[in-house]
């Protein structure tokens, strides 16, 4: 059995891990896979076919978010301290779980605790990611000193990993002793763009998808957006998962149907846009050290334009959408990272 662990911080970690697991499944149809984390089970089962076990279990803290654009540093420090107060019990529980399941390898994106459990259980481990939590916590520690302890604990666990599969937009991965670059892991639309637009009832106007994940962005002025009638605005409350499923569409199809995605730059939505060839309008996301790395590298992958938080929250988005539509897209990149990663995972399984 392969046991895959995912961070609970946002859906981007889960969607890319599921892409890798789907590539593993394509090469090993009978391999039992267990998926452990706190993301919705339906997201996992939609991407990875049986034999599959999904276990709902917290394995890290990540960051405590106020909303999609702001996180709460004191609350994050407090949550990390509470989680780590039971670190030994949690690690031993995972060791027992791995042994009971007959696990042969552990794959994680990218909670630290499961790697320590794998080491204690004598199992090979692989990590998948473009940043690590020791890097994030070390960055925040000058304002939240207790996070220095969290950073050190995470780094010690990461040091036990046999191989890190390093994704694009990478930074802060020095805790891992062995790293190998893999290509972009990205979901792709399954429904052709013209057909997806037809099912969604889109007309000839440019369509802008406002996407801020499961947290959403309270206070965004919908009325202000809709004053710009030259753009068709696609907002999350109009497009719940049940409606998309009724139309035979998934979220990557929605991204592919749009001309522009308006979002914060995180790996999940950025890679969805890359996979669909859709332009990006992005806004800042607080003092998160992944952000400048993403912004620097975005032009290699996508046509992208910046929009301030203030303009976004006031609904003044149309100008940025029109500016990005004037930009040329770079050549479509190879999206072979999941296949590359799957080969390394299967090698670890022997």
Image (cartoon, rainbow, N blue to C red):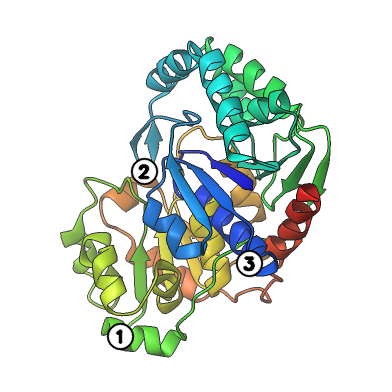
Q: Earlier in the sequence, mark 3 or mark 2?
A: 3
Tell which tag, 1 or 3, sits nearer the viewer: 3
Q: Is residue 147 visible?
A: no
Residue extending farthest left: 223
Q: Is residue 138 above or below residue 13?
A: above
Q: Is residue 152 left or right of residue 255?
A: right
Q: Position of residue 207 (x, y in %)?
A: 35, 76
Which dot, 2 or 1, sits closer to the camera?
A: 1
- SS of the residue at dot 2? loop
Q: Is residue 209 above or below residue 341?
A: below
Q: Residue at x 34, y 49 (%)?
A: 214
Looking at the rendering, which quadrant does residue 38 occupy?
A: top left
Residue under label 1: 199
Is 316 in front, or is 29? 29
Distance between the alpha carbons at the discs numbered 3 and 2: 37 Å
- Characterize the local packing of mark 3: few (<14), some (14-19) or many (20 or more) Cα atoms within 10 angstroms: few
Q: Which residue is mark 3?
A: 29
Lower sequence index among marks 1 and 3: 3
**Residue under label 2:** 68
Residue at the image point whose x is 59% and y is 45% from the top: 4
Image point (82%, 32%), residue name: 177
Give the vertical position of 106 relative to 147 (above or below). Answer: below
- Can the viewer see residue 252 in this picture? yes
Q: Are marks 1 and 3 in contact (CB under 8 Å)?
A: no
Left or right, 334 with respect to 226, comes to right
SS of the residue at dot 3? loop
Q: How many residues crowd mark 2 within 10 Å: few (<14), some (14–19), many (20+)?
A: some
């Amino acid at each position: 059995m392969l046991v895959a662990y995912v961070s609970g911080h946002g859906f981007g970690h889960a969607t890319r891990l599921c892409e890798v697991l789907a590539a593993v499944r394509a090469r090993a149809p009978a391999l039992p896979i267990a998926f452990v984390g706190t993301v919705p089970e339906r997201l996992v089962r939609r991407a990875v076919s049986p034999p599959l076990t999904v276990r709902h279990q917290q394995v890290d803290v990540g960051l405590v978010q106020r909303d999609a654009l702001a996180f709460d540093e004191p609350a994050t420090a407090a949550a990390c301290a509470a989680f780590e107060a039971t670190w030994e019990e949690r690690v031993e529980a995972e060791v027992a779980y791995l042994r009971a399941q007959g696990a042969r390898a552990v794959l994680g994106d990218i909670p630290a605790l499961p790697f320590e459990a794998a080491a204690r259980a004598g199992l090979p481990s692989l990590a998948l990611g473009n940043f690590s939590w020791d890097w994030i916590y070390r960055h925040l520690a000058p304002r939240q000193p207790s996070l220095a302890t969290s950073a050190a604990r995470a780094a010690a666990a990461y040091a036990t990993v046999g191989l890190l599969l390093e994704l694009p937009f990478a930074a802060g991965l020095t805790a891992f002793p062995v790293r190998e670059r893999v290509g972009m892991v990205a979901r792709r639309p399954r429904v052709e763009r013209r057909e997806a637009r037809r099912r969604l009832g889109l007309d000839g106007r440019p369509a802008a998808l406002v996407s801020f994940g499961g947290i959403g962005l309270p206070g965004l002025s919908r009325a202000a957006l809709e004053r710009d009638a030259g753009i068709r605005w696609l907002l999350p409350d109009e497009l719940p998962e049940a409606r998309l499923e009724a139309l035979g569409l998934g979220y990557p199809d929605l991204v592919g149907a749009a001309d522009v995605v308006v979002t914060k730059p995180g790996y999940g939505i950025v890679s969805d846009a890359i996979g669909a060839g859709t332009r990006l309008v992005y806004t800042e996301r607080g003092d998160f050290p992944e952000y400048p790395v993403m912004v620097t590298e975005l032009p290699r992958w996508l046509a992208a334009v910046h929009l301030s938080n203030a303009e976004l929250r006031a609904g003044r988005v149309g100008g940025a959408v029109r500016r990005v539509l004037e930009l040329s897209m770079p050549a479509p990149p190879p999206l072979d990272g999941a296949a590359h990663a799957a080969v390394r995972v299967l090698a670890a399984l022997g």
